[in-house]
Image: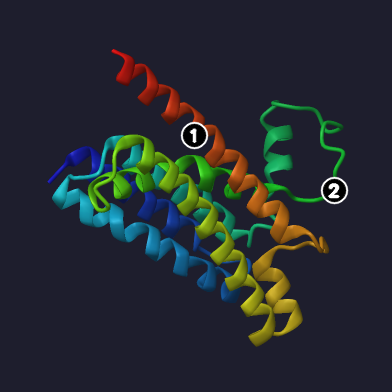
Amino acid sequence: MDKIRLTLVLLVVAITIITCIHPIYPNEQVLQHIGTVLLLIPLIVDVFRKRLPISAFLGITCFTILHVIGARYIYSYVPYKEWAVSLGIVDAHFFHDPRNHYDRLVHFSFGVFLFPYFVYICRKWVKQPSFVAIFMAWLMIQTGSMIYELFEWLLTIVMTPDAADNYNGQQGDMWDAQKDMAMALVGSTGMFIVYMLRCFITHKR
């Protein structure tokens, strides 16, 4: 058993438990944590198997923590502006846009933090060369982002309008899904370039 990986998993579990104490939006938070469970599965399995690269393990860990924080405030109400002001990072006049952009950060992080994991999957499971695996990982990020937005759209059909809006975090933006996918595209494209450059340099050597 890897002690470092176990410590990271326990950290995620501890943060999840803490954010569930006196929930602000109990029903929506439970629905959000379906994603938390799915993210924890590869982490817990890898504590014993130790097959994931540390970059992939750390990436899933960081993304899960961001998601857990967002789940407590159902994304639309994460008080990151208040936190930034209280910590003295920015002044009270720094944030001009009234919209809460925490969900945009998480979609961007999906493209960044989960990219190493998808590269690992493509290299080990699909048995593809590095350049092909990296491109396939980039495609998987876009596909995953699209599927998630379709899932949110389906929720608007089966849930009440208020409940669906609370979960989806659209905040009145009719282009919310497109902007979310664009953020995942930007994050994953940055990682794609980094990985391709590293492969090119390694190959030349």
Type of amino acid at the residue the image marks with label 2: Pro
Image location of residue 27, percent across then percent down:
58, 76
Numbered label attached to residue 98: 2
Q: Secondary structure at mark 1?
A: helix
The C terminus sits in image quarter = top left
Q: CA distance from mark 2 to mark 1?
A: 30 Å
The residue that mark 1 highlights is: 191
Name the residue at the top extreme.
Answer: 205
**Is any atom of residue 114 visible in this view?**
no
Q: Is residue 173 above or below residue 88?
A: below
Residue under the image location 43 percent in, 61 percent down: 36
Q: Is residue 98 above or below residue 92?
A: below
Q: Is residue 190 above or below residue 179?
A: above
Q: Is residue 86 left or right of residue 152?
A: right
Residue under the image location 39 percent in, 58 percent down: 39
Which of discs 2 and 1 lies nearer the camera? The answer is 1
Type of amino acid at the residue the image marks with label 1: Met
Q: Is residue 46 left or right of residue 114?
A: left
